[in-house]
Image: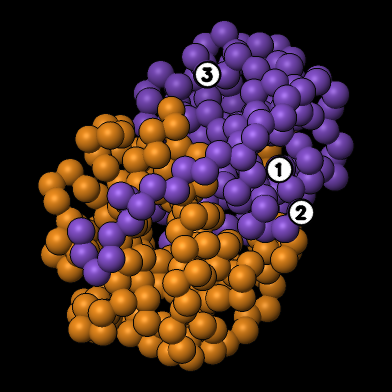
Chain colours: A purple, B orange
Amino acid sequence: MDVLEAIFTRRSIRKFTGEPLSQEELETVLKAGFSAPSAHNMQPWHFVVIKDADKLEHIAEKHPYGKMAPQAGCAVIVCGDSEKQTAEGFLVADCSAAMQNMLLAAHGIGLGAVWCGIYPQEDLMQLMIETAKLPKGIIPVGMMVIGRKAQERSQQDRYDSAKVHFGQW
Amino acid sequence: MDVLEAIFTRRSIRKFTGEPLSQEELETVLKAGFSAPSAHNMQPWHFVVIKDADKLEHIAEKHPYGKMAPQAGCAVIVCGDSEKQTAEGFLVADCSAAMQNMLLAAHGIGLGAVWCGIYPQEDLMQLMIETAKLPKGIIPVGMMVIGRKAQERSQQDRYDSAKVHFGQW
């Protein structure tokens, strides 16, 4: 799929068939995450892949926007190492760039995915820390739920010229 | 360009020919920014496009990693509206997803670009607020310097299996 088409047609997918991903598909998506830029090229990200049904059910029960995780069959928690990148604003930016790459890669190979926000919500961060047994200093920034699409969503044009400013605000 | 190729071959470009972008190219890149996902689909971003030579020189003088802005001929400050999205962690994530889309779109149409970090560094935020005359509540998250490439950079494989965790950390 062309990169512009991928960017313009990617939508959040929340309905899945339940058919599992292949290891190759998962690796392509993870490799996309690793290909993001990061502040001072610190690459401070880690990825926790969760496929265990009980863990996905637990996430679905506790995360208000994570109900589709068990049906998707896979969640990837994108985490940042706060010892490697001590400026939390940069850490969130780096992990978000990785997440966006992963969403586009998933869409590009025909999968569906959705970004479920975690950071800075304390309760959701704690849920991820416990579920993935994250060590101290590892911050869960966001969760991608990924699987085979059971819905198609049409392209949405969000361009808003009122939000583009030339020269200054 | 294929989306996976774009993701895997995109690199930060810091050398530019000085030949200006077309309005169509700039709009394609901005449209990519608008196509990012955002928490609760709030779309809290704004984009300030700076082409004025004096302003670009001022940025180059004050931003330690913005020296290439005048030669590129264009900078886009990606800002977040903190009244629209009050959770600053989400605001940074949303603007970073928009930025990553823009970097990939630029690469996909043969342009070069680099993400210069702004938030959370107070001095750089203040520089952007003054240069772009940002109103209160508008947070400069990052700056993209974009132009015509005067360098090619080879693909870099950053995949690190030590940063992928299955089931739990």
Q: Are marks 2 and 1 on the same chain?
A: yes
Q: Please, what is the three-letter code of the amino acid marked with disc 2?
A: Met
Q: Which label's residue is closer to the chain start, 2 or 3?
A: 2
Callouts 3 and 1 in the same chain: yes
Chain letter for the residue marked with disc 3 in the picture: A
Percent of width and height locating residue B5: 73, 63
Marks 2 & 1, CB-CB < 8 Å contact: yes
Residue that numbered label 1 is attached to? A107
Q: Which residue is mark 3?
A: A65
Against B169, residue A94 (above or below) is below
Instruction: Determine which residue is flagged by label 2.
Output: A1
Left or right: residue A107 versus residue B73 is right
User: Residue A3 bears which disc, if any?
Assistant: none
Dot 2: few (<14), some (14–19), or many (≥20) neighbours within 10 Å? some
Q: Is A82 displayed left or right of A32 in the figure?
A: left
List x then y, in percent, for residue B141.
32, 54
> How far from the left and from the top, in percent, is residue A39?
43, 61
Q: Is residue A17 visible?
A: yes
- Asked whether residue B14 appears in the rendered view, the answer is no
* Percent position of residue A76, x then y: 64, 34
Q: Residues within 10 Å of mark 1 (few under 14, many from 20)?
A: many
Q: Is residue A69 above or below residue B114?
A: above
Q: Which one is earlier in the sequence, the residue at label 3 or at label 1?
A: 3
The residue drawn where x is 46% and y is 79% is B21
